Amino acid sequence: MNRMLKPGLYAITDNALTPADQLIAAVEAALQGGATLVQYRDKAGTSAERLRQATELNALCRQANVPLLINDDPELALRVGAAGVHLGQDDCTLTDARRVLGPEAIIGITCHHRLDLARNAKAAGADYLAFGRFYNSATKPGAPPAETTVLTEARALALPITAIGGITTDNAEALIRAGADLIAVVGGLFGGTSEDIRHRAETFTRLVARHHPLFSYSN
Ligand SMILES: Cc1ncc(COP(=O)(O)OP(=O)(O)O)c(N)n1
Ligand SMILES: Cc1ncsc1CCOP(=O)(O)O
Ligand SMILES: [Mg+2]
């Protein structure tokens, strides 16, 4: 895996789920519970709000020594000094994002259920490949469905693999067993009190620890 990417829980924020005044406490709880990667995903805020939130999250994640990725927006990632970006198939190209952020940045790519997209992403220099949605997702109900076999097949590409979509502490194990390094979660993590979030994050972290060969508690 990219030296900054560790197997475990990939905590993804959502503006519709977490009110702005609870965002920092929610991510802090996810980090306390062992999240190894964080994504700031905000589809609604003004650029000023996004800049403020991304700046605060970046400080928090740096303190925890956990990379922060920005969804969709390499310029915002550059501006706040985040570790990288996550890009979908309809976002800017990986080549353009790499030009903005440089060779050290972590760039992850949505591959839905498709190995051809994964091969293209690898060829263009992706740092991880994201597959899903694996289960019904209230956060992104229209995301194309994927089967767990794609996780196993994608191991041959020798890049870190992320699974996403409707993941909860009750259904994550099958994805880790099938080959996911990172379990990316919005609704199954956030929502509820900080105590709830920390507890769920600990459970996801334990599941990866139990079923992933490379997991280490050293982070
Ligand atoms: C880890 C991870 N995987 C997939 C996505 C989805 O990206 P995209 O298809 O661009 O959709 P939006 O998140 O932008 O709505 C993701 N964000 N993170
Ligand atoms: C962004 C995204 N891409 C595919 S499914 C999804 C949403 C993940 O959110 P949840 O964990 O709430 O299903
Ligand atoms: Mg996107």
Image (tube, helix red, strand yellow):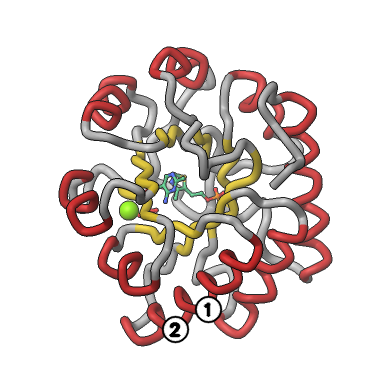
Label 2 to label 1: alpha-carbon separation: 6 Å
Q: Is residue 54 above or below residue 166?
A: below
Q: Position of residue 191 (x, y in %)?
A: 68, 65
Left-right relation of 75 to 137: left
Q: Is residue 184 above or below residue 75?
A: above
Residue at image point 27% right, 32% down: 121
Give the residue pinned by disc 1. 56
10 Å crowding of disc 2: few (<14), some (14-19), many (20+): few
Q: Is residue 59 above or below residue 37?
A: below
Residue at image point 37% right, 33% down: 112
Disc number for residue 52: 2
Residue at image point 64% right, 26% down: 176
Tag 2 and tag 1, C-beta contact below 8 Å:
yes
Look at label 1 and name its amino acid: Glu
10 Å crowding of disc 1: few (<14), some (14-19), many (20+): some
Q: Position of residue 199 (x, y in %)?
A: 83, 55
Look at label 2 and name its amino acid: Arg
Q: Secondary structure at mark 2?
A: helix
Q: Is mark 1 within 8 Å of ligand 1?
A: no
Q: Is residue 62 above or below residue 48?
A: above
Q: Position of residue 157 (x, y in %)?
A: 39, 18
- The answer to which image quadrant residue 189 occupies is bottom right
Out of 206 and 58, give the one closest to the viewer.
58
Residue at image point 46% right, 35% down: 132
